[in-house]
Image: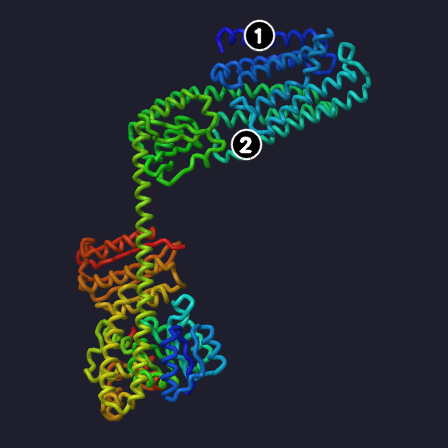
């Protein structure tokens, strides 16, 4: 699995590269600016680009703009944006109209190595990885006549994991239940929310996020 | 000037005027083709009389100015040229030698108004050259002959050369007059503000006189056929200038009665703007500027409290300083022509004394408010910068290092895979780091909403809506970024307003609207709750009003009981 990294903090950049290499990823390039990142993506067509949202020179939105450009012009390259803060607005901007091959995680998530590497793999494979804080914020959002109130605690839990971008199997492993059980829950949830339950996992992510956001 | 001397000059002027009439009527100019002798005689004596008498009046009003004397000289010079109508040798020669002096004197009078002095090297050079041309070339022409048998100065008769010199001379003098016209027009244009009415009339009369002189002289030079009529018209026009001068004087006399009106207006304790207008009316100077002296700032200021430089606005403006009880109060920047009427200026400034002092205090207060506003803006801005810097330091400094540290621990864990007690401790350390990172993130978030500066209001508000305690409907016009200070203020406003809705309003829905039109941004947060909010409720709204006003905007709150609450901020942004 080929990875490029754009991160201006040298400790973090080198540490990530070392770690990913040790776990069998092929780090084909790393850099500290948006321009270099786009060059690396063009030259190496990696499976996934890990991008710090704040890059020089202004440290405002350079990273996000580079990520959006990769999404627009290199649809086969997954983009995992790492940020010091997670915001619903930013997540929606990054996803735009597809959750395919995109991730948006708090930088702190690197701390949990196993989960982090799983997220990198999911994004590289065309799936999604949305930070749990985004999902919980959206779940807590007040609505009139909230259909979410009809969900059982277990269903809420499954909805959350689903929105993060996990597969049914991933959810089953995480909750230690059977795949069949997860599938049953998922179809109940979609029924209660009135969502059509078709499509790939990343389509499912977008549908759930848009639902939660509205 | 003593009044006896004045009487002498006046009588001399009358005598000279009478003489002109007699001279023309008894001479043989009628046969010389100059035209109806009586008309000419009356016009000529009218000019003599008008200039001498008006010069006298000007001299008595302002003995220090040369202007009156110049006018008198012009009047008598006009009379002297009439001597050339006498067929006797000496008077004819004198009259003929001075023939072109009056046009140059008129030019001198017009340019020297009102002080009697010429301004700048160009004007002085022009007048000196004009005098030398008028007298010098005339003598040369007379030496060459062609002026008839009474010319005492004829030494080397050469009629052709004499005519040529005379033509050159006439053309030159008319060119000088046109230069003078240019100077008058340029002065009026440079003035760039409304002139006092009497002054404008006078300058128009001057300009017209110069045009006519130039036209007349050019007609002579090229032998145009209508010389007689042109001559009458020119004399009549030249006679207009003293009339305009008298009209100006009459205006000024009327102006004195305006001081009485001023007293009445001042009793109403006018605001600084009205005070200026009242003074401008009383002085009949629409261009008047009033500058208040602010001792604490060591500068002058206009009625808004904005600093004003006397030296910059001077130039062709006259400055009169107004003191009260030995302390400077204000300065008047007025039309220099007002210096002709020191009594009027003194009366007006004396009448306005107390009102000016009041207005000065008023203006000083405004200047101080202005200064406070500026320092408040600087404090807010400095605070904002500092928070931004802190936030970035936390995120890009401490947070980065902690994440990197955690990464190193992970790598270490790989190497110690077999040692369960060591990996357990590492796991615990990573838990600590996790907690620290979370705390750090919350602190940094509270210090400065980096997402606003990084990604704009529309993106940032989404998070506020998601976390609000009531359902929120967003209507954000997202047309690109706004100035950073506006976005940050709008963000805090929406955040605080939504928090208030959640805490107090008992609302079922809140709506956030951001719209841009007519160079301003309107931010509105509306709820359908119980209303009755007052600005006392929490210092939050007060602080927000500060922030908004700081940007030149304003914040209003409507909150009728049981009618919901509407918080609206309007901030100018280009």
**Residue drawn at point x = 38 percent, y = 21 percent:** B257
Question: With A14 as the anchor, is B18 left or right in this view?
Answer: right
Do the numbered discs 2 and 1 sit on residues whose CB atoms are within 8 Å?
A: no
Residue B225 image point, x, y percent: 73, 23
Residue B529: quadrant of the picture: bottom left
Mark 2 or mark 1: name the one nearer the start of the chain: 1
Give the SS element for disc 2.
helix
Q: Please tell me whether residue B548 is drawn above or below residue A164 in the rendered image.
A: above
Residue B546 image point, x, y percent: 27, 52
Q: Nearer the viewer, residue B452 or A58?
A: A58
Question: With B217 as the anchor, is B525 left or right in this view?
Answer: left
Q: Chain of mark 1?
A: B
Instruction: Estimate how packed mark 1 is, as few (under 14), some (14 to 19) or many (20 or more) residues with alpha carbons within 10 Å.
Output: some
Q: Nearer the viewer, residue B165 or B38?
A: B165
Residue B456 image point, x, y percent: 36, 65
Instruction: Estimate how packed mark 2 is, as few (under 14), some (14 to 19) or many (20 or more) residues with alpha carbons within 10 Å.
Output: few
State the mark number for residue B187: 2
Colour logic: rainbow
Which residue has dot 1 on it?
B12
Q: Mark 2 to mark 1: distance in Å?
A: 35 Å
Q: Chain of mark 2?
A: B
């Amino acid at each position: 699995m080929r990875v490029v990294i754009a991160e201006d903090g040298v400790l973090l950049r080198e540490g990530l590269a070392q770690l990913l290499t040790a776990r069998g990823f092929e780090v084909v390039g790393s850099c500290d600016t948006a321009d270099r990142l786009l060059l690396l993506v063009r030259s190496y067509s990696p499976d996934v680009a890990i991008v710090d949202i704040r890059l020089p020179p202004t440290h405002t939105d350079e990273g996000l703009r580079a990520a959006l450009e990769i999404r627009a012009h290199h649809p086969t390259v997954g983009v995992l944006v790492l940020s010091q803060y997670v915001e619903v607005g930013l997540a929606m901007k990054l996803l735009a109209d597809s959750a395919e091959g995109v991730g948006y995680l708090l930088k702190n998530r690197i701390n949990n190595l196993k989960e982090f590497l799983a997220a990198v793999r999911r994004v590289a494979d065309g799936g999604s990885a949305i930070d749990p804080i985004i999902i919980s914020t959206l779940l807590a959002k007040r609505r009139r006549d909230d259909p979410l109130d009809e969900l059982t605690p277990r269903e809420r839990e499954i909805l959350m994991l689903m929105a993060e971008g996990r597969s049914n199997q991933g959810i089953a492993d995480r909750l230690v239940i059977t795949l069949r059980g997860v599938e049953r829950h998922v179809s109940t949830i979609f029924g209660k929310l009135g969502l059509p339950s078709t499509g790939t996992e990343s389509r499912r992510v977008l549908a759930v996020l848009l639902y939660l956001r509205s | 000037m003593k009044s006896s001397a004045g009487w002498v000059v006046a009588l001399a002027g009358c005598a000279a005027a009478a003489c002109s009439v007699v001279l023309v009527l008894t001479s043989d100019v009628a046969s010389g083709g100059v035209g109806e002798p009586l008309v000419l005689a009356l016009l000529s004596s009218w000019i003599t009389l008008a200039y001498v008498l008006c010069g006298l009046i000007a001299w008595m009003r302002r003995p220090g100015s040369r202007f009156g004397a110049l006018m008198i000289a012009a009047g008598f010079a006009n009379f002297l040229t009439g001597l050339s109508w006498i067929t006797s040798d000496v008077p004819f020669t004198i009259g003929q030698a001075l023939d072109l002096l009056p046009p140059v004197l008129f030019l001198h009078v017009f340019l020297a108004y009102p002080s009697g002095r010429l301004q700048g090297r160009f004007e002085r050079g022009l007048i000196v050259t004009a005098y030398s041309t008028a007298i010098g070339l005339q003598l040369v022409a007379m030496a060459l002959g062609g002026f008839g048998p009474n010319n005492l100065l004829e030494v080397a008769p050469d009629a052709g050369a004499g005519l040529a010199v005379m033509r050159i001379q006439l053309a030159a003098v008319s060119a000088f007059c046109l230069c003078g016209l240019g100077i008058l027009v340029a002065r009026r244009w440079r003035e760039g503000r409304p002139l006092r009415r009497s002054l404008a009339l006078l300058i128009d009369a001057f300009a017209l006189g110069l045009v006519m002189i130039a036209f007349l002289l050019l007609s002579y030079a090229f032998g145009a056929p209508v010389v007689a009529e042109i001559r009458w018209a020119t004399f009549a026009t030249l006679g207009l200038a003293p009339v305009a001068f008298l009209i100006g004087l009459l205006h000024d006399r009327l102006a004195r009665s305006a001081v009485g009106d001023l007293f009445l207006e001042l009793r109403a304790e006018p605001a600084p703007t009205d005070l200026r207008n009242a003074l401008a009316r009383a002085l009949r100077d629409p261009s008047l500027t009033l500058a208040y002296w602010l001792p604490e700032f060591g500068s002058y200021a206009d009625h808004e409290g904005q600093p004003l430089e006397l030296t910059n606005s001077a130039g062709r403006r006259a400055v009169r300083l107004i003191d009260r009880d030995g302390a400077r109060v204000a300065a008047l920047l007025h039309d220099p022509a007002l210096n002709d009427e020191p009594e009027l200026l003194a009366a007006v400034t004396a009448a306005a004394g107390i009102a000016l002092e009041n207005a000065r205090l008023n203006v000083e207060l405004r200047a101080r408010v202005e200064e406070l506003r500026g320092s408040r803006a600087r404090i807010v801005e400095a605070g904002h910068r500092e928070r931004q810097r802190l936030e970035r330091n936390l995120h890009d400094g401490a947070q980065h290092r902690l994440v990197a540290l955690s990464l190193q621990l992970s790598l270490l864990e790989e190497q110690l895979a077999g040692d369960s007690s060591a990996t357990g401790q590492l796991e615990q350390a990573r838990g600590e780091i996790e907690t620290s990172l979370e705390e750090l993130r919350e602190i940094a978030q509270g210090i400065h909403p980096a997402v606003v500066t990084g990604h704009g209001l529309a993106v940032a508000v989404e998070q506020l809506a998601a976390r609000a305690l009531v359902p929120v409907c967003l209507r954000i016009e997202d047309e690109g970024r706004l100035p950073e200070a506006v976005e940050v203020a709008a963000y805090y406003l929406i955040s605080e307003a939504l928090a208030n809705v959640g805490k107090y309003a008992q609302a079922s829905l809140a709506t956030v609207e951001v719209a841009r039109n007519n160079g301003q941004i309107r931010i509105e947060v509306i709820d359908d709750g119980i209303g009755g909010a007052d600005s006392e409720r929490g210092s939050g709204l007060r602080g927000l009003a500060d922030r908004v006003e700081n940007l030149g905007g304003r914040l209003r709150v409507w909150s009728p009981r049981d009618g919901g609450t509407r918080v609206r901020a309007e901030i100018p942004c280009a």
